[in-house]
Amino acid sequence: MNINWNLDDPDNYDPWQAAMNSKLEWKRMFSFDDYLATIVSFWENALEKHTQYTSDLYWEVESGKTEMQGELDYALFEENKFPEFENDSFSSFFVMIYSYMESELLWYCRNLEKQNPQSMLLSDLAGGNSVEKFMTYLIKVQHIEFSKEKSPEWAKVKDFTLLRNCIVHNQGRVDDSFSKKKELLKFIQGQDSKLKLEDTTCILDKNFCSYALDIIKRFLDSVAAAKKTKVP
């Protein structure tokens, strides 16, 4: 979107539009698609190579050509750990894109606070998680026309917040030590969550990460596109 006004001319300068167009553009997130593809390719290739290595060891041990039972046992142990390592990678990716969303919203709030000052500051808002706080500031203080109730992306972002907190603060375990266990289980067990549980651990895969990335893109897009309500 092109800015077609003279920033040096106060009569034609709209600080809201300047703030809106300066940075908050979800198209910048397409680089995360490439990164996700790299993660997927890495684990597919690593598993293929390791499976071949284990298979070769197995036949050498079975044929009596080598006494490498110890090496075979360790290779099988490593192979069984691959899903855990893969889950760690996808969990880290998810936390990264969630953090990116937070940083974009924070930048947006700070830029509007500077360009379109109000009596209430972002720092005056207390309580809640950071994304809730940023959206409260944008809606209640800067008066953007964004309806949480009508946004399917916002509903998902709230679920993502639960998952992010579980990964960061409870190593992805959905057990009694996680205070929002009931709420997170409802999300995980939902029809379209693209998540699953193994014992009490939440498992993320490439499909979930791609889905979460798309939701975050659309959420940031909808926030950036929201107009400012004219208030007296």
Image (spheres, rainbow, N blue to C red):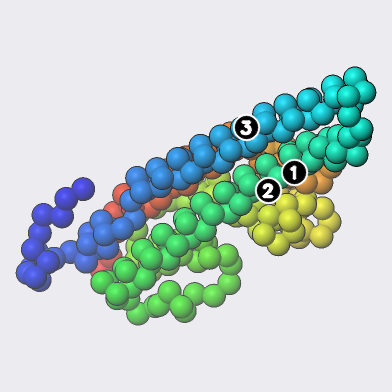
Q: Secondary structure at mark 1?
A: helix
Work out whether 53 lies above or below 232: above
Q: Secondary structure at mark 3?
A: helix
Q: Which mark is residue 88?
A: 2
Q: Which residue is mark 1?
A: 84
Asked if disc 3 and disc 1 are in contact, CB closer than 8 Å, the reply is no
Work out whether 14 lies above or below 223: below
Q: Is residue 8 left or right of 172 when viewed as pictured?
A: left
Q: Earlier in the sequence, mark 3 or mark 1?
A: 3
* Residue 5, quarter of picture: bottom left
Callout 1 amino acid: Glu
Residue at image coords 72%, 26%: 52
Residue at image coords 57%, 65%: 129
* Residue 34, quarter of picture: top left
Q: CA distance from mark 3 to mark 1?
A: 14 Å
Q: Position of residue 44 (x, y in %)?
A: 62, 32
Mark 3 vs mark 2: in front: 3
State the count of labels: 3
Q: Earlier in the sequence, mark 3 or mark 2?
A: 3
Q: Residues within 10 Å of mark 3 (few under 14, many from 20)?
A: few
